[in-house]
Amino acid sequence: MKVSRTDELITAISAAAIVVGYTADTPPEGPTAEADAATNGAISKLIEAGEITGKAAEVVSILAPAGLQTTQLVVVGLGPADSLDRGSVTRAIGSAAKHLAAKERSRVAFFVGDWDGPLVEAGVSAAICACQGQDIHRETNKLHPFDEIRWSGAPEGALEAGQVLGESVNLTRRLVNEPANYIFPQTFAEQAGAAAADAGLEVEVWDQAKLEAERCGSLLGVSRGSTREPRLVILRYHGGAADQPPLALVGKGVTFDSGGYSLKPNDSMKTMKCDMGGAATVLGAITAIARLKLPVNVIGLMGLVENMVSGDAFKLGDVLTARSGKTIEVLNTDAEGRLVLADVLDVAAEMKPGGIIDLATLTGACCVALGLDVAGLMTNDEELRGRVSAAAAACGELTWELPMFDHFGEQIRSDVADIKNIGEGRWGGAMTAAKFLEEFVGDTPWTHIDIAGPAFLDSAKSWIDAGGSGAMVRTLVEVARDW
Ligand SMILES: [Zn+2]
């Protein structure tokens, strides 16, 4: 999608649709007032009639508006003036764009007033994401990206940054939305390599033989049941000073999770193509960081396996030896994400990064605790966790910290190995999983983000289709901006 600035007046521009904003409880102002005047008070009349309220993300279409060179004027609600932030802009502009994307449109013009760079960036990225649906294998798509976005009053660089961000979130979403017969470790690694090369990143891929040579016994144990070979993709971006310790982003990439011998029931398994959401998030974020040329060093590591059942699959009671040398008793083959991450975190920690952030669709327990829209944060370093929380809040993404009390760690002690891959009973599963991961990061400041809820939407929102959400890509880019 082409994105560019316009300096034309709202009454002069010719577009398939024009979008203006309306803030609750205020008279129309700026371009909205100009559109109101041009349309002989159409907006004012609808406000008076209560049809337009300015409620956040409300979308009202005025068809064939007089006085404008368009067939549709969309008035999108921006909520109360004091609540305008990147989150509310994402929802509002996304809702307007998704409404318009139901049909093919050539040019859509946004006249939403004088926003600062971050708000414009959020608006543009939301519009790009809103036009992309999960129906990538349908002959006729339900959503249609516009040919062109024109944005009025954009500060320098904001449109370009918004476009990079939107496209990067869409890259994450597309990979999550691709079914597991299309995306498996090798094809994920190929597509990650291609996207990374386009963004100017250094690409290294560990195949089965290399993973064996590196003694990644925990990751390989999970992979054994699949005919698809595992991969570890390592991407490097050098944007900062040579001696600046990098930020390491680590993603769980289980391209399909059957649960293994701890087999999932049908309903829990049917969306398990999304269990590589952490790896896809890391890929989206690091390609965005590189394309934005942020002055920071970043390493992205994606552990890619398929968790399947076969005569050779790992079994309950098996003991795996992780790359770090720790032995792990497997008491649930569906708690495989932590086994994959154990080795990838070990590789990451060895690179002496300034901090590690891992992302994983790790536990149903995190969804039970926080609901489906909130990512759980667990850490060994409150400072790093605070930076992740602040970045998420700035982007309008929802996170909440979960505790890392010592007794959660006691629950993963094993009688036959150093640790086991599941806690005692079902309670506190998000934290016992995080305690397991903590065993492999050493002294490195580390924050774990459990995205089991927000990475995949079971139903659509008004501003984004169901399926892969690209949650936390924006947050990771924000962390890198301030690294
Ligand atoms: Zn699992």
Image: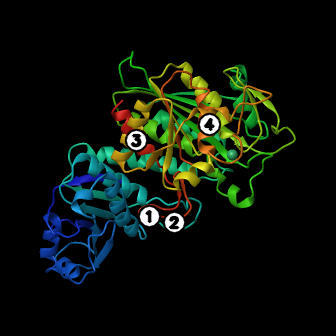
- Report the disc number at residue 144: 1
Quarter of the picture containing the C terminus is: top left
Helix, strand or loop status at disc 2: loop
Q: Which mark is residue 141?
A: 2
Q: CA distance from mark 4 to mark 2?
A: 47 Å
In the picture, measured across the screen, residue 254 lies left or right of residue 152, that is right
Q: Spatial distance from mark 1 to mark 2, Cα to Cα? A: 7 Å
The mark that comes first in sequence, 4 or 2, is 2
Q: Which element is circle 3 on?
A: helix
Residue beneath disc 4: 408
Instruction: Look at the numbered discs 4 and 2 and tell me whether their residues touch, using CB distance below 8 Å.
Output: no
- CB under 8 Å between discs 1 and 2: yes
Q: Which residue is mark 3?
A: 389
Q: Earlier in the sequence, mark 3 or mark 2?
A: 2
Disc 4/disc 1 C-alpha distance (Å) = 47 Å
Quarter of image, res 48: bottom left
The answer to whether the residue labelled 4 contacts the one labelled 3, judged by CB atoms less than 8 Å apart, is no
Quarter of the image where one finds residue 478: top left
Q: Position of residue 452 (x, y in %)?
A: 57, 49
